[in-house]
Image (cartoon, helix red, strand yellow):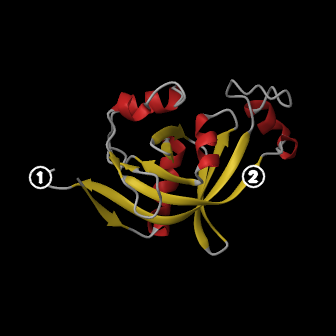
Amino acid sequence: MAEREHFDVFDRSGEIADAIRHCVFLTTRRGDKVNTMAIEWGALGNLWAKPVFIAFVRRSRFTREMLDANPEFTINIPTGPYDRKIFKICGGRSGRDVDKVKETGMTLVNGEKVSVPGILELPMTLECKVVYRQEQDVSLIPEDVRKRYYPHMPERDHDTDEDDHVVYIGEVVDAYVLRRRLGS
């Protein structure tokens, strides 16, 4: 179904950083359930002599529940035009309520080093294993940022985009671009 073109994550770090500003997708798996969410907060870096992807996931998100149950994820990055329906559904609907894979018609491709799949339609794939998890201490965030992104804190309104985050640092254990195999 798909071939993989492996690459060194730091050789494409500029492209990855640029994609984060526009939107990448974080995919999780728990048992047979796969969930993908659109994210615009994240970073690629080097920590403890390992390539890492740092993701911020609000406490209220289904993705957080999935990551806490299975501390592996993939980052799926568009490398050209893609069906914007994927962004609309994965950025605006909860995996608790809808099967985003089915709704978007995405094609899942099994991971090589993690249990979480990549997405053929979002072909640049970073396979990650969580090496560190930290709940935010909003009191340590600069006031201007806190006012903009956490205006209801410390009340913790977990049903909106105004609750705080859990920071997940995932070691990037594999990186590749998925390509549809000819004849598939």
| Element assignment for label 2 | strand
Q: Where is residue 122 in the image (x, y as percent from the top left)?
A: 37, 46
Residue 6: x %, y % from top left: 36, 67
How far across and down, in percent of the image, does residue 70 sit? Answer: 58, 51
In the image: residue 45, left or right of residue 159: left
Q: Say which residue appears at 61% left-offset and 44% top-offset.
A: 41
Q: Is residue 84 visible?
A: no
Q: Residue visible at 32% across and 48% down? A: 120
The image shows residue 49, relative to residue 5, as above or below, that is below
Q: Which mark is on residue 102?
A: none
Quick one: 83 or 96, which is closer to the camera?
Answer: 96
Graded by Cα atoms within 10 Å as few (under 14), some (14 to 19) or many (20 or more), the crowding at tag 1 reads: few
Q: Which mark is residue 183?
A: 1
Q: In this view, does 43 lie above or below 154?
A: below
> Residue 42, position in %: x, y?
60, 49
Disc 2 designates what residue? 134
For this orientation, the residue located farthest to the bottom is 49
Rendering quarter of residue 21: top right
* Mark 1 residue type: Gly
Asked if residue 58 lies left or right of residue 21, the reply is: right
Mark toward the start of the polypeptide (2 vs 1): 2
Q: Which residue is drawn at 59% across and 63% down?
A: 52
Q: Is mark 1 on a helix, strand or loop?
A: loop
Residue 107 versus residue 11: which sits nearer the camera? 107
The answer to whether residue 12 is above or below residue 37 is: below
Kind of residue sitting beneath label 2: Gln
Could you tell me which residue is drawn at 63 percent across and 34 percent down? 61
Residue 162 shows up from this direction: yes
**Separation of marks 2 and 1 at Cα, in angstroms:** 45 Å
Instruction: Give neighbour class at mark 2: few <14, some 14-19, many 20+ (Cα, 10 Å).
Output: few
